Amino acid sequence: LTTIVVDKTGTLTNGKPQVTSMVNFIKGQPLLEIAYSLERLSEHPLAQAVVNYCEEQEAQHQVVTQFSIAPGGGVQGLIDDVAVAVGNYDYMQTQGMTKNLKALDFAETIIYVGRQDQVLGYFSLFDGLKVDSLAAVEHLQSLGLKVIMLTGDNVATASQVATQLSLDDFVAGVAPDAKLAHIHKLQAAGERVGMVGDGINDALALSAADVGFAMSQGADVAIESADVALLSNSMLGVGRAIKLSRLTLRNIYQNLVGAFAYNILLIPVAAGVLYPVMHQLINPVFAAMAMAASSVTVVLNANRLRLIALE
């Protein structure tokens, strides 16, 4: 691998966002009720954060019909036959809810709530970085890998995370199909790409990457789409897996060289190449010992991998 592409939410961050503020453009409870009614039907971490906030505010939920989810965008449906939606800026545009819609340059995740053709307000959410994300990124970079973040979040939030982690590059506001396209773009440029993700939004990119890494607490579809399922929910496992695979391949080469050396040296001797000069042939016992020594050498060399620190 030459480039590692990472998702943000749940991969670099804790995946447990919290609502830090709510802005309501109208009086009353419709914003909370619409958000609660829609988000309770979604399993996304951002949706769960909104649900938790609405429950704290003792909001009531209503029956939603024709509910649908757009991965990386938002959710929408009908309440009393009126179109409602919750999602990011681009998603609200696609739903035609553009009245009061403004792109906000906050270093937090913004989730808009809309009804019919207007935005009723929005939630600001914050999701902190995992304590070991910086160490994980630094480890990958020390292995000579470029680390790029692809996220559906806004530019301000993505830029802040990229700066904190000293990432090589980032792309914000990308939908699942855009993540897939970016993977293909990197591969077309000659990069061998590893993708790290945990959500439904990452499934396409995980399957398209040269090697896909899924976080242990990721969605089932992400784990099924990936080549490697990490046993922990830490990105440190990616660097360890890559380092171990490199050491394993080097170990294989060493073992091949050792095995060939034994054969190249001793097979001609066993065939009698020294007999005309030294009148010597290999004793069968010595030949058996040499064969056993070859196998023991390979096994002992392979076992050295157990003693290597992968940090």
Image (tube, helix red, strand yellow):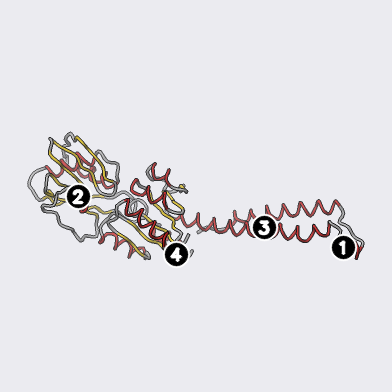
Q: Which numbered marker is on residue 214?
A: none
Amino acid type, label 3: Leu
Quick one: label 2 or label 1, which is nearer the N terminus? 2
Q: Residue at x 87, y 54 (%)?
A: 283
Q: Position of residue 107 (x, y in %)?
A: 24, 60
Q: Describe the element under mark 1 as helix, strand or loop.
A: loop
Give the side of residue 94 with respect to residue 131, left or right.
left
Q: CA distance from mark 4 to mark 2?
A: 38 Å
> 112 and 57: which one is in front?
112
Question: Which residue is tagged 1?
Answer: 274
Amino acid type, label 2: Thr
Image quadrant assignment for residue 235: bottom left
Q: Describe the element under mark 3 as helix, strand or loop.
A: helix
Amino acid type, label 1: Leu
Q: How many marks?
A: 4
Q: Which numbered marker is on residue 141?
A: 4
Task: Spot the residue most to the right.
Answer: 279
Q: Residue at x 79, y 55 (%)?
A: 290
| Mark 3 or 2, closer to the camera | 2
Q: CA distance from mark 2 to mark 1?
A: 83 Å
> 200 and 298: which one is in front?
200
Are dots 3 and 1 in contact, CB under 8 Å?
Answer: no
| Mark 3 or 1, closer to the camera | 1
Quick one: label 3 or label 1, which is nearer the N terminus? 3
Q: Residue at x 35, y 64 (%)?
A: 169
Image quadrant assignment for residue 36: top left
Q: Describe the element under mark 2 as helix, strand or loop.
A: helix
Question: Which residue is tagged 2?
Answer: 94
Question: Which residue is tagged 3?
Answer: 256
Q: Position of residue 111 (x, y in %)?
A: 21, 50
| Mark 4 or 3, closer to the camera | 3
